[in-house]
Amino acid sequence: MEEDNPNYLAGIAKEIRKKIIEMTYAAKSGHPGGSLSITDVLTVLYFKEMNVDPLKPQDENRDILIMSKGHASPALYATLAVRGYFPENILNGFRSIDSDLEGHVHRGIRGVESSTGSLGQGLGVAVGFAIASKLDKKDNKIYAILGDGEMEEGNIWESLMAANKYHLNNLIAILDRNMIQLDGFTENIMPLGDIGEKVKTFGWDIININGNDIGEVISAIEEAKKSKNKPTMIVANTIKGKGVSYMENNPKYHGAPPKNEDEYNQALMEIGGI
Ligand SMILES: Cc1ncc(C[n+]2csc(CCOP(=O)(O)OP(=O)(O)O)c2C)c(N)n1
């Protein structure tokens, strides 16, 4: 099977990264940094690990993904398009007035399960989906993608407690630990320290990985799926802006696309898109 070949998945991740750059450059706005950091995770989920079918986006037994860090919409939209939920040319309208592709993840888009963008809310939504699946005796999985800056939101911790209370072993949160939030480094703004250890004390299993290594992402998700009675958080250590040298680890590209044609061409060239 082609999805068992990491080189195949790496090729898809490149394609998605290229689209993130194209979309944000065309819109002259958007969030490339935290989209590029989470691309490898989304690739593994949508092209290997999740039970989803773009032809049946409402299938009752599908896995559900909530992109809690909803500003990373370029990454989710590009992934859904490449996976076949909607035509890739729709990405061109990102953030324009006549397009459905708003700057933050919007439920009106085929394949999107919940609108997000106000940080802190998506984990609670995922907890709700996970409880509902248990009540319905389904064996699907619920995924939530969180940002590390987002962990500063109080309602994340309420959701962590609820997931423990209800033994949500069908819930897998993936924390994009890229160490950067909107305008600086998390450890300067609000230190999170060993965030995995903190979440562990809330009753979760923790798996630490390099979230830009496709093989490590696959192993972590496959391990998390086997949990018998606990929710799992995968702490995905990533690089913000991954794949574009001037964006990597640079808070300036949290919410700014390539500044000019030179930067645009350099980004595509480094990703391997042209
Ligand atoms: C409740 C709320 N407060 C503030 C913002 C503005 N905001 C958008 S992105 C962001 C930083 C998020 O950082 P992080 O979660 O680490 O995301 P990543 O670095 O992965 O992009 C902030 C503060 C928001 N979207 N929602």
Image (spheres, helix red, strand yellow):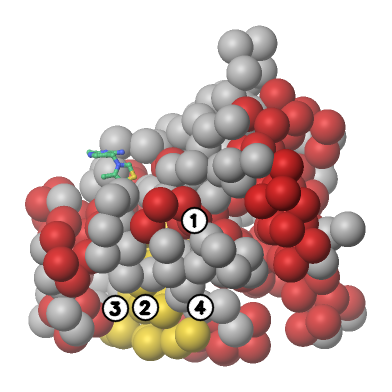
Q: Which residue occupies the foreground of this view, 215 or 63?
A: 215
Q: Quadrant of the C terminus?
A: bottom right
Of the residues shown, which amino acid type is indicated by label 2? Val
The residue that appears at 31% across and 84% down in the rendered structure is 206
Helix, strand or loop under label 3: loop
Helix, strand or loop under label 1: helix
Pointer 1 residue: 33
Instruction: Tell me if I can see residue 108 in this picture.
Output: yes
State yes or no: Cβ of the residue under disc 1 lies below 8 Å from any atom of ligand 1: yes
Real-space CA distance between mark 1 and mark 3, rounded to the nearest whole angstrom: 31 Å
Extreme-top residue of the structure: 98
Of the residues shown, which amino acid type is indicated by label 1? Gly
Pointer 2 residue: 235
Helix, strand or loop under label 4: loop
Real-space CA distance between mark 3 and mark 4, rounded to the nearest whole angstrom: 21 Å
Pointer 3 residue: 230
Instruction: Tell me if I can see residue 234 in this picture.
Output: no
Pointer 4 residue: 211
The residue that appears at 84% across and 76% down in the rendered structure is 8
Indicate left or right for 128 with 71 as reference: left
